[in-house]
Image (cartoon, helix red, strand yellow):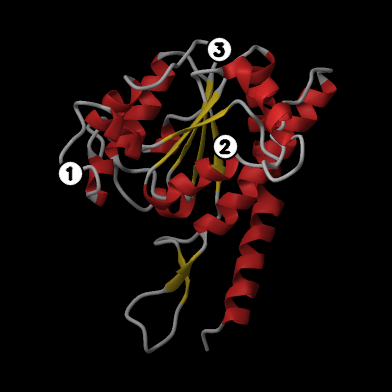
Amino acid sequence: MISASVFVEAALDAVKQVEGTQLDVIREAGKRLAEVIVNGGVVHIFGTGHSKAFAMEMSNRAGGLVPMHMMSIDDLWRSKNAPDDIHDPSIERDPAVAHDLLQLYDIRPEDGVIIVSNSGRNGALVEMALLMKQRGLPLICVTSLAHTQSVTSRHPSGKRLFEVADVVIDNCGPIGDALLEAPELATRVCSISSVTGAVIAQCLTAEITRNLIEAGVEVPILMSANVDGADEFNQRLTARYAGRI
């Protein structure tokens, strides 16, 4: 029987699977991304569809690290070359989108990248990964290995995201993302990638922070805007990255 309690149990199982299988790669990713920040870089985070929630989880939020920059297809509204079908979900299949987006951002050699896609197959994501690798930037990906290894790429190279990244973090979701099934349903219900994605995002924040503390540098953490004194506190930190985050 499908219920809230059944989903909570299944979701906790998925989170425990992340804990049991992914902490080593999360630590490795945290180490590499901390080095980016120590060297004055920014971490650019890109996801399409619901995967952009991962970028929102890591950027511009209380308790998060300042030099985290969310990249979004929605930003193409700022471009005079914005495609007419910007809100068509299938736009993420077009590799040209990655080139259009990169024209909007200040990407530097000292930066790093996280790209998030449950399927890891669509053209815009894979093209962005390849472009970032051409620039020599460290690339972390978060994907469902069960899903991505069960499908073919939609990119001309034939590659999927995990085949391009330096560090691959598995969100431990099933093929198709949804968890729960019942005889009355034609397909499963209740997706999990956003849940485990949020956990992975905060684990990365924790590991980056740990590495920055060990390096003896100031950890640039955003304070909640609803705390007295936060505006001044945050402005001091964000000034270092003006125009980049």
Contact? badges 1 and 2 (CB < 8 Å): no
Q: Amino acid at mark 2?
A: Ser
Dot 2 or dot 3, earlier in sequence: 2
Residue that badge 1 annotates: 85
Residue farthest toward the front in the current orientation of the protein:
228
User: Is 220 left or right of 136, judged from the image as shown?
Assistant: right
Front one among 143 and 67:
67
Q: Amino acid at mark 1?
A: Asp
Residue pictured at 22% horizontal, 49% vertical? 88
Alpha carbon separation for disc pair 1 and 2: 26 Å
Front one among 89 and 170:
89
Q: Amino acid at mark 3?
A: Glu
- Above or below for 15 versus 80: below
Residue pictured at 62% horizontal, 41% vertical? 61
Dot 1 or dot 3, earlier in sequence: 1
Question: In which quadrant of the rendered view does residue 92 lie?
Answer: top left
Alpha carbon separation for disc pair 1 and 3: 33 Å
Dot 1 or dot 2, earlier in sequence: 2
Residue that badge 3 annotates: 110
User: Is 99 left or right of 237, judged from the image as shown?
Assistant: left
Can you tell which mark lies on residue 59? 2
Disc 2, SS: loop
User: Is 117 left or right of 156, judged from the image as shown?
Assistant: right
Residue pictured at 60% horizontal, 71% vertical? 10
Residue pictured at 64% horizontal, 29% vertical? 66
Residue 159 appears in view: no
- Above or below for 45 versus 238: below
Relative image position of residue 73 (x, y in whole percent):
33, 38
Contact? badges 1 and 3 (CB < 8 Å): no
